[in-house]
């Protein structure tokens, strides 16, 4: 009987935790939705945490339960989703391809995602990734943990003989990511007025990194 009582209490505790977690997720989502609505109308720079809290109907105390800064809300929205970019890259390497094809499809995916948001927000998202990168390096994070955009596709390309065996894939992926991020930042700063031209940018990145091999092993 004692064991049964303990089990009942445990079940009750778990059943109470579910709605608490649900309410917490609902509050977090409300904050993110309110922030996005304000950013679309007022812009990122002119929207404060107070504005977001009022629009979401939450207190500042609750805001800081979920987010340390306004920029953390931006990161939570996931302007860039690497999952989609990597899935697109996997589809490319499943058929005959060259390295520029892989780079181009990743850039095209980022371009498509970016156009769903205000240009200012994309610009700020890129800047925030730079800030996070700096903090990560200060904390001793390995470069391989920061090359989330191209490391997986480049490793596959090397496996398929599209890159020389001796090349530092991690370093190449980091440089490619930096080049693409900077182009997206400048594209967003120009309010998306000109197309990003993924194929052209991809060829430029491939030539800068691997022009000696022209996309093939030496």
Image (cartoon, rainbow, N blue to C red):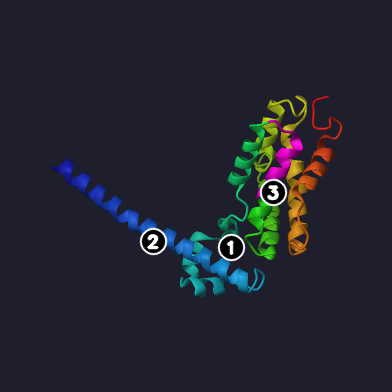
The segment highlighted magenta reads 96-109
Instruction: Label 3: state its secondary structure.
Output: helix
The crowd level at tag 2 (other Cα within 10 Å; few <14, some 14-19, many 20+) is: few
Q: Considering depth in this image, is 100 or 119 the residue closer to the camera?
A: 100
The total number of labels drawn is 3
Viewer-nearest of discs 2 and 3: 3
Residue 99 picture location, percent across and down: 75, 35
Specify whether residue 98 is painted magenta: yes
Residue 75 picture location, percent across and down: 59, 56
Asked whether, in this view, residue 155 is left or right of residue 54, the answer is right
Q: In terms of image quadrants, where is residue 105?
A: top right
Q: As drawn, which residue projects farthest toward the front? A: 96
Gap in angstroms between the C-alphas marked 3 and 1: 30 Å
Asked whether, in this view, residue 87 is left or right of residue 147, the answer is left
Residue 67 picture location, percent across and down: 53, 60
Pointer 2 residue: 23
Pointer 1 residue: 69
Pointer 3 residue: 108
Viewer-nearest of discs 1 and 2: 2
What residue is drawn where x is 52% and y is 65%?
Answer: 33
Q: Are marks 1 and 2 in contact (CB under 8 Å)?
A: no
Q: Main secondary structure of the magenta part?
A: helix
Instruction: Label 1: state its secondary structure.
Output: loop
Gap in angstroms between the C-alphas marked 1 and 2: 21 Å
Quarter that holds the N terminus? top left
Viewer-nearest of discs 3 and 1: 3
Specify whether residue 67 is painted magenta: no
The crowd level at tag 3 (other Cα within 10 Å; few <14, some 14-19, many 20+) is: some
């Amino acid at each position: 009987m004692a064991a049964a009582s303990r089990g009942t209490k445990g079940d009750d505790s778990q059943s109470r935790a579910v709605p608490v977690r649900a309410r917490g997720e609902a509050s977090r989502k409300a904050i993110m939705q309110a922030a996005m609505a304000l950013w679309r109308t007022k812009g990122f720079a002119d929207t404060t945490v107070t504005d977001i809290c009022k629009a979401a109907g939450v207190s500042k105390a609750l805001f800081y339960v979920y987010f340390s800064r306004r920029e953390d809300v931006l990161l939570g929205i996931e302007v860039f989703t690497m999952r989609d970019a990597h899935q697109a890259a996997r589809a490319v390497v499943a058929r005959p391809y060259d390295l520029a094809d892989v780079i181009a499809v990743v850039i095209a995916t980022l371009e498509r995602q970016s156009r769903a948001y205000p240009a200012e927000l994309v610009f700020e998202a890129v800047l925030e990734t730079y800030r996070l990168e700096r903090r990560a390096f200060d904390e001793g994070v390995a470069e391989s943990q920061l090359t989330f955009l191209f490391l997986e596709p480049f490793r596959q390309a090397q496996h398929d003989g599209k890159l020389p065996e001796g090349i530092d894939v991690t370093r190449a992926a980091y440089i490619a990511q930096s080049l693409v991020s900077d182009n997206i930042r400048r594209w967003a700063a120009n309010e998306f007025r000109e197309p990003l031209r993924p194929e052209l940018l991809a060829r430029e990145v491939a030539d800068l990194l691997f022009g000696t091999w022209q996309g093939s092993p030496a």
